[in-house]
Image (cartoon, rainbow, N blue to C red):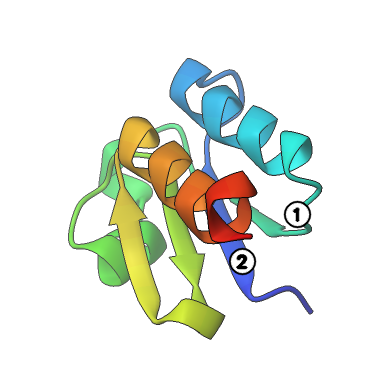
Amino acid sequence: MSTLVLYELEGCPYCAKVKNKLAELGLEYDSVMVPQSHDERTEVEEVSGQTGVPVLVDEEHGVDGMPESDDIVEYLEETYGGAAA
């Protein structure tokens, strides 16, 4: 099992941005699709304290629920990209 988990919503452009970065870096991750309705997104809310997506969990690096696609992309680049080498 991957230590990266991405909470996402089908057709979400912000989620796509994060998925593109994961693919670019060749990272494996587990995808958790959240319900369309914010009221039903209890799992992602428990992880991150909010119902928006995307949310990234990186157990290996102690990231419990990072929201905001730009922050996630920056984190992935810094942690797993060329800057990490």
The image position of residue 41, as x and y in percent, is 36, 51
**Residue at (63%, 46%) from the top-left corner?**
82
Q: Does label 2 or label 1 sit earlier along the sequence?
A: 2
Q: Which residue is mark 1?
A: 27
Q: Specify the label residue 1 is tagged with.
A: none
The residue sitting at 35% across, 49% down in the picture is 40
Between 19 and 49, the one lying in front of the other is 19
Callout 1: helix, strand or loop? Answer: loop
What is the quadrant of residue 64 in the picture? bottom left
x%, y% of residue 18?
55, 35
Q: Residue 72 is drawn in which quadrant?
A: top left
Distance Cα–Cα, label 2 vs label 1: 8 Å
Q: Position of residue 51 (x, y in %)?
A: 26, 47
Measured along the vertical axis of the image, is residue 64 above or below residue 14? below
Residue placed most toward the observer, 42 or 84 = 84
What residue is rendered at 78% in x and 58% in y?
A: 28
The residue sitting at 73% across, 44% down in the picture is 25
What secondary structure is found at the residue carrying circle 2?
strand
Could you classify mark 2 by the number of other residues whose Cα lies within 10 Å: few (under 14), some (14-19), or many (20 or more)? some
Residue 34 can be seen in this image: no
Query: In which quadrant is the N terminus drawn?
Result: bottom right
Work out which quarter of the rendered image holds the C terminus and state it: bottom right
User: Would residue 60 appear left or right of 29 to someone viewing this image?
Assistant: left
Q: State whether residue 56 appears in this view.
A: yes
Q: Are marks 2 and 1 in contact (CB under 8 Å)?
A: yes
Picture disc at residue 4: 2
Task: Residue type at mark 1: give it.
Answer: Leu
- In this image, 37 relative to 11: left or right? left
